[in-house]
Image (spheres, rainbow, N blue to C red):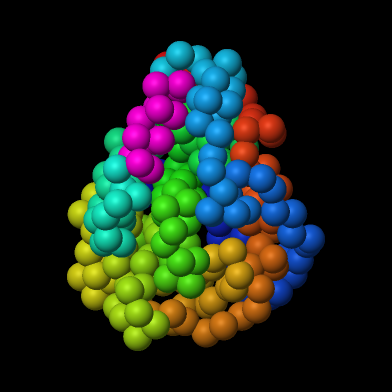
Amino acid sequence: MNGRLKGNNAFFRACRSCLVVSALGISCLYAAPTQKLDEAKITSTLEKRYGERAGMRARAWFKVLAEASTVDEKEKLLKVNNFFNLFRFVDDIKLWGESNYWATPMEFIGVNGGDCEDFSIAKYFTLLELGVPEDKMRITMVKATSVNQYHMVLAYYDTPASIPLVLDNLDHVIKPATQRKDLIPVYSFNGKQLWLNKEQGRGVLAGSSTRLEKWNDLTHRLGVDRLRQPKLKLE
């Protein structure tokens, strides 16, 4: 994608060699998808931390949650994908001052941008909040041949045997993985498991997602209590 994931070669090698292991810390906001979110607190906190427009985006996000709560899963995918693909793409090094920072959905909404991991992570947790089962989703690292870089997308499996649908910020149209010949799967994960991918399917189970240090750090920061200020102000 437009100039991204330069730091993930080393991260992927660490994942492959099983060297990245740390404790999982699940935090508040998405720990229980059925728990009602505190819209007023989230909106006011984002507004105070990131400005008035961040509060507007938070309200727009809650509107998407409300509208998508009454539709089927495919329509949920569409609404969430369309909403987050309106956000700006920015390299981590420019936005956060480090090469590979995984922003939480609240940080992503607050600052109005991020890189491909941030798009995929925000879509994943929002769909979890809408009741889409975790087992149907995989945050997936791929090699994007169109830009010759590593890239991250969200894959959705309607059934265990289904060809996954790809939610992407490079190509805004949700398509089956078989129609995305430009993406070569590398590894994928959700809140439970980690897979090493060798084809456009589920891949080979490689253990718990707690082996991913970046994922552990991310889940520890979920919610609005540990929001980070960006190095670059987008608005």
Image position, residue 30 (x, y; %): 58, 50
Residue at x 60%, y 54% (from the top left corner): 32
The boundaries of the magenta stretch are 54-66
Residue 93 in which image quadrant: top right
Quarter assignment of residue 164? bottom left
114 up-or-down from 73: above or below: above
Instruction: Pinpoint residue 192: horizontal percent, then vertical percent.
Output: 61, 70
Instruction: Tell me which corner region of the image, top left, top right, bottom left or bottom right, holds residue 202.
Output: bottom left
Question: Residue placed at 39% from the left, 35% from the top?
Answer: 61
Q: Main secondary structure of the magenta part?
A: helix
Residue at (40, 35) in percent of width and height: 62
Question: Is 120 drawn above or below residue 157 in the view shown?
Answer: above
Q: Is residue 163 left or right of residue 143?
A: left
Relative image position of residue 161 (x, y in whole percent): 35, 85
Q: Please say whether residue 186 is one of the residues in the magenta stretch.
A: no
Q: Nearer the viewer, residue 181 or 145?
A: 181
Of residues 96 and 3, the one nearer the viewer is 96
- In depth, the one of 112 and 129 nearer the eye is 129
